[in-house]
Image (cartoon, helix red, strand yellow):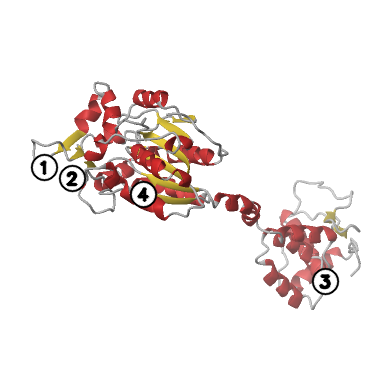
Amino acid sequence: MGNSLACFSKKNQATKIRKKFNKNNIPSTRRSSSNIRRIPPPPPPCISRSTSRKSDRIIYPSSSRIIDHDIDHDYIREQARVAAALLLQHHHQNGTFSQFERSVSLRDPLNCSSRKQKRYNNNNNNIMPRSSSSRRARSQSDSLPHHLELLHQGSRNVEDLNHKHFVLVHGGGFGAWCWYKTTTLLKESGYHVDAIDLTGSGAHFFDSNNISTLSQYVKPLIDFLEKFDDDKKVILVGHDIGGACISYAMELYPSKVSAAIFVAAAMLKSGQSTLDMFSVQLGLNNLCQRAQIFRYANGKDQPPTSIDYDKSLVKEVLFNQTPNKDVELASVSMRQVPFGPLTEKLSLSSTNYGSIPRFYVKTQDDFAIPASLQEVMIDSNQPEQVFQIKGSDHSPFLSKPQALHKILVEISNIPPKMNLKTI
């Protein structure tokens, strides 16, 4: 068959159609002459293919038109089915049916090979060559997947992050567990992360009532830094009284700390203790004071040995913006806060502690360390830069983890500089 099909003559049209239907076991339509008025059928369509092979068209002669409302619609539908069958047969015989399949293969390249093999067998090796446009489309579909391309493009950035190492230090009563969202986000961003359990906290099995000094409380962090490579540095992040803990570590190992981030934390001056700073809020936050329960393991006539939290008030004080599931996690994970380390005054020097850039992250809706007390610490011991998390309670790593993560990443990308401020 050539590039186009010849039109049927009007004389033989009805006979050929009946023969075609009988050949394909399709019964002819019989009608009573008394019920249906015979009308000469319209001329059959001419099936033509353009030389450009962009499309196949069914062309109806201009003389074909409906002239009566009593026309035999079933008969016309039969003609349409015949035309469709002939068009399909025409594509099979000329091998042009494959051009429709190639467009599908571009959408589903994984399954196209099996379909092409079937067409190869069915058409007796008669496979049409691909057009240049098809080859261009296929070359695009065979390129590296989008997510792998992004990974490849960002490989250098990931390598740059390999030397960025965060060490997360929890606050009083918390443990390394409280950082689980922050740890996950940082690791997914390519950072090295370690969350420390201080003595008697989290999974560290030690009685908080037997911790009397800051050095004893901070020992797990000091041990970590002591073993850390001398040619590498970490970014210390401290929360709550963890701020005093990282300050203590900064004084001992300034060469191993590139930056310090205080998250709603005690940022003290030399000669201050955490208790000194927190005593400023007396009368400012009666709720926090009511939530604290002092424990006297050595007897009532001796100073307190630890501080516990009233379970009925802990959500309102520490987790007023935190999801309930994380509040439940905290309620079964929090431990007593050792009292002795809170009373110890820090000795900080400008050459060690003062040489490390400090950053402060304020928590706006904090009822444990109110924003006003955070402002006092910022004003008396000014950091390099202050960030603020709106809508965060005292535990932004649980209530606003994405916002905290963004700030930590931003700080990690600040170029290091020598900072020799006098304390």
The three-letter amino acid code for the residue at tag 2 is Asn
Identify the mark nearer the N-term, 3 or 2: 3
- Residue indicated by mark 1: 298
Binning the other alpha carbons within 10 Å of mark 1 as few (below 14), some (14 to 19) or many (20 upward) gives: few
Identify the mark nearer the N-term, 2 or 4: 2
Residue at the image point whose x is 51% and y is 52% from the top: 231
The reply to whether dot 2 and dot 1 touch (C-beta < 8 Å) is: yes
The three-letter amino acid code for the residue at tag 3 is Gln
The three-letter amino acid code for the residue at tag 4 is Ile
- Residue indicated by mark 4: 222
Q: Nearer the viewer, residue 156 or 154?
A: 156
Residue 169: % across, % down = 37, 44
- The label nearer to you, 2 versus 4, is 4
Find numbered disc 1 in the image and state the secondary structure of the residue it sits on. loop
Residue 348: % across, % down = 38, 35
Q: Any mark on residue 209, and which?
A: 2
Which quadrant of the figure contains the C terminus? Answer: top left
